[in-house]
Image (cartoon, rainbow, N blue to C red):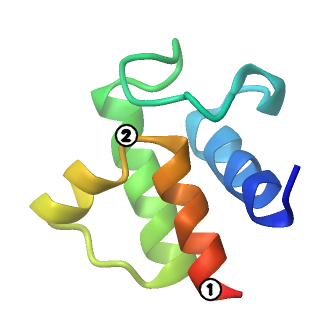
Amino acid sequence: MSTQYASAVELLASALNCEPETLSSDSAIAQHPAWDSISHLNVMMVLEQEFGIPIDDVTIERFTRLSEVEKLFQTAT
């Protein structure tokens, strides 16, 4: 497991208020019990705070999978 993947899992688990063990590389909005449209807003707020990413339509549509969040950590390091 890469450091970036572990960081993405930790961030999502915190934003979704779920156990990190329940997340996998395939985790996505509407495919994880804790990741619905309302909790997706929490994910967006955490991404804005952590990376300074503005919340807009493009961002909301782009970061709907754990793998996309992991890419943020890859580019930040």
SS at badge 2: helix
Residue 70, position as x, y percentages in the image: 60, 59
Query: Which tag, 1 or 2, sits closer to the chain's start?
Result: 2
- Badge 2 is on which residue? 40
Q: Residue furthest left?
A: 57
Q: Is residue 68 above or below residue 77?
A: above
Residue drawn at point x = 46 percent, y = 55 percent: 68
Q: Is residue 29 above or below residue 61?
A: above
Q: Give how far apart the Cα atoms at labels 1 and 2 are.
A: 21 Å
Residue 73, position as x, y percentages in the image: 64, 72
Dot label at residue 16: none
SS at badge 1: helix
Residue 61, position as x, y percentages in the image: 21, 50
Q: Amino acid at mark 2?
A: His
- Badge 1 is on which residue? 76
Residue drawn at point x = 46 percent, y = 26 percent: 35
**Residue 33 in the figure: left or right of residue 13:** left
Disc 1 packing (10 Å; few <14; some 14–19; many ≥20)? few
Residue drawn at point x = 38 percent, y = 57 percent: 44
Q: Amino acid at mark 1?
A: Ala
Q: Are marks 1 and 2 in contact (CB under 8 Å)?
A: no
